[in-house]
Amino acid sequence: MASLADPLDLPSGVRLANRIAKAALSEALGDADNSPDERIVTLYRRWAEGGYGLLITGNIMVDRAHLGERGNVAIEDDRALPQLTAWAKAAHDGGAAIFAQLNHPGRQSNLMDIGHTPVAPSAVPLALPGAAVPRALTGAEIEEIIERFATAAEVCEDAGFDGVQLHAAHGYLVTQFLSPLTNLRDDEWGGDAERRMRFLLEVVRRVRARVSPGFAVAVKLNSADFQRGGFTEDDSRAVVAALAQEGVDLIEVSGGSYEAPAMSGSQAASTRAREAYFLDYARSVRAAAGTVPLAVTGGFRTRSGMQDALTAGDCDVVGIARPTVTTTDAAHVILQGRAASLETHEIGVGMRRVIGRFADLKMLDGVVSLAWSTDQLHRLARGLEPDLERGALRTVVAMVRRNGKVSFRQRRGLK
């Protein structure tokens, strides 16, 4: 029976000092060249002092021409190796392992920054106002993207990261290959469930072939995309079973996409009350995962809820993200018993009667709350404390300044 304070040895040999992970948050702190700088080192040094067994970075893109949002870090080669090394060292100095989350946005690109048509498995646009129709990738381009993931992983190992997490959730490119709604291909990359998962499996294989056996390869996977006719829990369980055969080190369970953002806490109150949004799914996939450790992120707030999940064997690692924005030492708070639960801060748009007539208030509230969290991350990166009094108006102004019109599209969720 595992305790939150117990270490965990992953199949690669990487040891996590305890069972609490700081899950991925999209930092948007890359410089003009989409490389990390001292701000991200400052931020991760702060988190590294917080007692987490594992820190997982936010979106690191494998192609500078295809960013999820303005400010993403991108790794195409070793041009930023010193900065990446400093990033990994900041985590290690605090006693935490660190995984770099590698991603390609596919059709969920930040169109205002890219200035050209996004790419995807098939020419299926996002079901959002103004979304461009993506261009279907050629077979040669698919092979190139797989190689980009492998190159980025190799650079991360050279920089001292303990592993990488391949982002196969939240509607990004890997998820687009997995879903029958977005993958309409009839070649070797689509046509049935087995061929739809091939892209992910080939990325895992190529990455594993390019890194050492002691370097961890993890995957973040949707339990479902929560869309009719889309990627289902049965589909996801089949992918987990296939990943277990590939020798991955950790599977983190999440769910949703820009179009159905379950990952950002948009569930009904009854679901949020169960604390962990995807725990039921994790319980159901245990057999398929075999000996591969499972992490669950999304909704954990109380020490009792976290420990109960471990005690029941539903997961091996508890991921928390949004609470770490304002309680940077959340792991210490839980492990040392300084509080029974973690606080989160939610804000919403004003003028609700007026705005609610022509916009989805739930979606807008989610966007503003996520932008508020990003503001706090940027304060931490400047060496400042969180500003809990920051209001919705200042948040919206800062969001528009950062991202332009794309700000009002549902961004990647923070758990």
Image (cartoon, grey):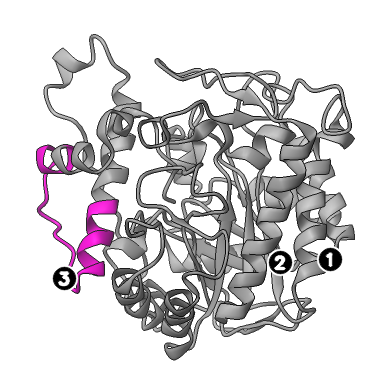
Per the image, label 1 sits on a secondary structure element best described as: loop
Q: Is residue 36 magenta?
A: no
Which numbered tag is attached to residue 217? 2
Residue type (three-letter) at the residue carrying disc 1: Gly
Label 1: which residue? 247
Front residue (pair 254, 139): 139
N-terminal-most mark, 2 or 3 = 2
Q: Secondary structure at mark 3?
A: loop
In the image: residue 377, left or right of residue 87: left
The structure residue drawn at horizontal position 48% and vertical position 86%, both measured from the top left corner, is: 92
Viewer-side residue, 294 vs 201: 201
Residue 40 in the image, given as x and y percentages of width and height: 34, 69
Look at the picture and state if 19 lies above or below 34: below
What secondary structure is marked by label 2? Answer: strand
Indicate whether 327 appears above or below 133: below
Quadrant of residue 215 in the image?
Answer: bottom right
The residue closer to the viewer here, 267 or 203, is 203
Residues rendered magenta in the picture: 374-396
| Residue for point 72% across, 34% down | 177
Q: State yes or no: discs 2 and 1 in contact (Cβ < 8 Å).
A: yes
Residue type at numbered disc 3:
Leu
User: Residue 384, which numbered label?
Assistant: 3
Q: CA distance from mark 2 to mark 3?
A: 33 Å
